[in-house]
Structures are given as structure tokens and as C-alpha cells.
Image (cartoon, grey):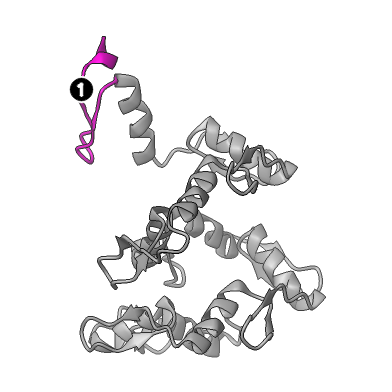
Amino acid sequence: METHSDEKSYECKQCGKMFTFSSSLKRHLQRHSEKKPYECKECGKAFKFPSYLECHMRTHTGETPLECKQCGKTFSWPMSLKTHMETHLRPHSGAKPYECKECGKAFNVRAHLRKHMRMHTRGAYECKECGKAFSSSTYLQEHMRMHTGEPYECKECGKTLCSPAYLREHMRIHTGEKPYECKYCTRTFTFHSSFKTHEKMHTGEKPYKCKQCGKAFTCVSRLYRHKETHSEQKPYECKHCGKGFRCPKYFRQHVSMHSGEKPL
């Protein structure tokens, strides 16, 4: 009978969201939990829901059973297909209804906005060992492998990386692979982030704007570094000499001068 009613009588005490069914509330509560009981036997990555693990396994098998009816492109994850379908809704209008409240950048797909917002909250999970901050607990856990002695090591040069994905990306340095080509000058790039930043030099796009002084930047990392110049706080202190730093990157570089190690 609850399916015939619009009443939502089950409330989440943590975020206030309401649900029609108790089973829906129970499933929602798992999102607030840090427990991830469903683990991939191939790579060790863990998930909160069995459906997420099932979709993840397709990344190992290469299976892409979800097909876009408009263009035939296939996907492994339902959310990836849903995000892709939004690109068909606004292909030529240029409408970008999803705007970031932090920096004003707009997106035509809601999922892209959610992914972007993690850049603003990346400092929520901070490594107590070196001060580096991450947008999710998963990324922090992978990073901690560097400190606990469980990293992924490159067989070519011995460099250690905190995740299999970073190791695969790093291997392009040795293979010479540059899969990203600029359509404006045909220059090629090893890393996607470098490629996207380079393209903005051609377009003049600077979507990340400082609210305090109005200065704009091509990538969000430069905006973050710039914002620290407005702050007098120096939360990262060197244990060797007591010098303080606003930015974790400069802090790590400084510490490496004492240890003699090359910073990651």
C-alpha cells in the first residue's frame, strides 16, 4: 500500500532525507557508513553495495553491456550511461544549468558537477604523515600505502605509486606513450591533466576565479595555491627546522631537502 502513497515516513537522522520504504532508508544509511564489505578479488578495491562490485568487475573483464540507443556507445556502469545520455539532451544548445557555488564554473551534466565539487572538498581527508589532502577516504587509504610500505612499485625505475591506476599512468613515461593530442597544435601529452590544461591556453579559458581578488586560472589546483596567498595561516610545520608553510606541496618539497629524498 505504501507504493500508492506519496507519504515518506522514514527519515535519515544523519542528513534528513526522507523515504517511502524502510528498505530504502536502510540502503541509504549504508552511504553514510565507512564499511565496504564487498571486495574485488582481482585488485582488492572494496565497495559498500554488491551492485557496485558487480559493475566494477566489468572493468577487469572488459564487459560493456549497457548501450546508448542513440549512438550505440556502450558502458560498464549505469551511472556512466545516464551521464552520457545527458550529453544528447543538450548537444548543441551550450546550456550548462549545473553551476558550482564555490567558483562559478558551470556544467551541462550533473555528474560532472558532483565530480568537480570533490575538488573543493579535497582537503577533507588529510594524511597525518605528510599533510597531503584528498577528496575521498578511498584515495587517502591508497595514499597511506606509501607510508605503510605497501606501494605499487615500477619495475623500470623503482618509483612507488599509491594505486594501480597511478602506476599504469606512470608507465607511459617509460613506454613513451602519449595518447592525448591537442587539436589546435597537434602537440601530444602523456597525462590527461596536462593535456586539458594545455588546451585552455589555446582557448583562453580560465574558469576558476578567486572570489577575493578576481584573479582567474586555467586549472583548479592553481586556484587553490593562489587562495593560500590570501591566508596568513601556515598549518604545515617542518619538524626539522620549524619553518611553516601554507601549501602541502611546498611543505613536502622542503622536507625532502632535509631527508635527501625526491618528493613524490
- The image shows residue 73, relative to residue 215, as above or below, that is above
Write the residue at 69% across / 65% down.
Answer: 167
Write the residue at 41% across / 65% down.
Answer: 128
Instruction: Please indicate, yes or no, whether residue 163 appears anywhere in the rendered image.
Output: yes
- The image shows residue 94, relative to residue 190, as above or below, that is above
Whole-percent x, y for residue 161 in the image: 64, 66
Extreme residue toward the front, this view: 92
Mark 1 sits on what residue?
Answer: 6
- The image shows residue 37, relative to residue 62, as above or below, that is above
Which quadrant of the rendered structure holds the C terminus? Answer: bottom right
Give, as a three-letter code, the residue at label 1: Asp
Write the residue at 29% across / 73% down.
Answer: 103
Q: Quadrant of residue 18?
A: top left
Whole-percent x, y for residue 61 in the image: 74, 41
Residue stretch in magenta? 1-21
- Regarding mark 1 in the picture, which secondary structure is present there? loop
Q: Quadrant of residue 152?
A: bottom right
The verdict on residue 133 being magenta is no
Q: Nearer the viewer, residue 104 or 125?
A: 104
Whole-percent x, y for residue 190 in the image: 68, 77
- Total marks drawn? 1
Which quadrant of the rendered structure holds the N terminus? Answer: top left
